[in-house]
Image (cartoon, rainbow, N blue to C red):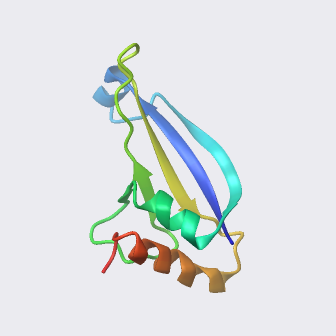
Amino acid sequence: MLKVHITYEVINDESAEHGEAAESGFLAENETYTLRELISILKQGEASCSPASGAAYEWITHYGEQDYRTGDYENRSIHFSLDNPSRKAKYWRLAMKAAGLIH
């Protein structure tokens, strides 16, 4: 089991003009996932840097669709929790590799 944080950011036209999110925060802190669950989630997103290396400081973002009612976009990111023992970072990298985010 790996602990991860899930964050969100909402972007609208006004906030985008200023290069910022209209709102952001945590959806979950230290949520636990099996390696299989984590791989499935990571497959849906994009790495925070290119090329990604699988480092514990990298995160994966799923870019949401535009809400046709408000015009807002909500993006969600998954981050390796530093509350994991340091030895668990290798599983984060393994999950990123299995999800096709790194080679």
**Does residue 100 appear left or right of residue 34 in this picture?**
left
Q: Is residue 41 above or below residue 52?
A: above
Residue at image position (37%, 26%) is: 15
Q: 94 or 50: which is nearer to us?
A: 94
Residue at image position (46%, 27%) is: 22
Where does residue 31 sit, x and y in percent of width and height? Answer: 69, 57
**Does residue 10 appear left or right of residue 79 in this picture?**
left
Q: Is residue 79 above or below residue 87?
A: above
For the N terminus, which image quadrant? Answer: bottom right
Where does residue 84 sit, x and y in percent of width and height? Answer: 69, 73
Q: Is residue 82 above or below residue 94?
A: above
Where does residue 73 sit, x and y in percent of width and height? Answer: 39, 30
Where does residue 68 sit, x and y in percent of width and height? Answer: 35, 17
For the C terminus, which image quadrant? Answer: bottom left
Residue 3 position by quadrant: bottom right
**Does residue 86 appear left or right of residue 38 in this picture?**
right
Residue 86 position by quadrant: bottom right
Q: 15 or 98: which is nearer to us?
A: 98
Number of numbered labels in the structure image: 0
Residue at image position (58%, 50%) is: 6
Q: Is residue 61 above or below residue 47?
A: above
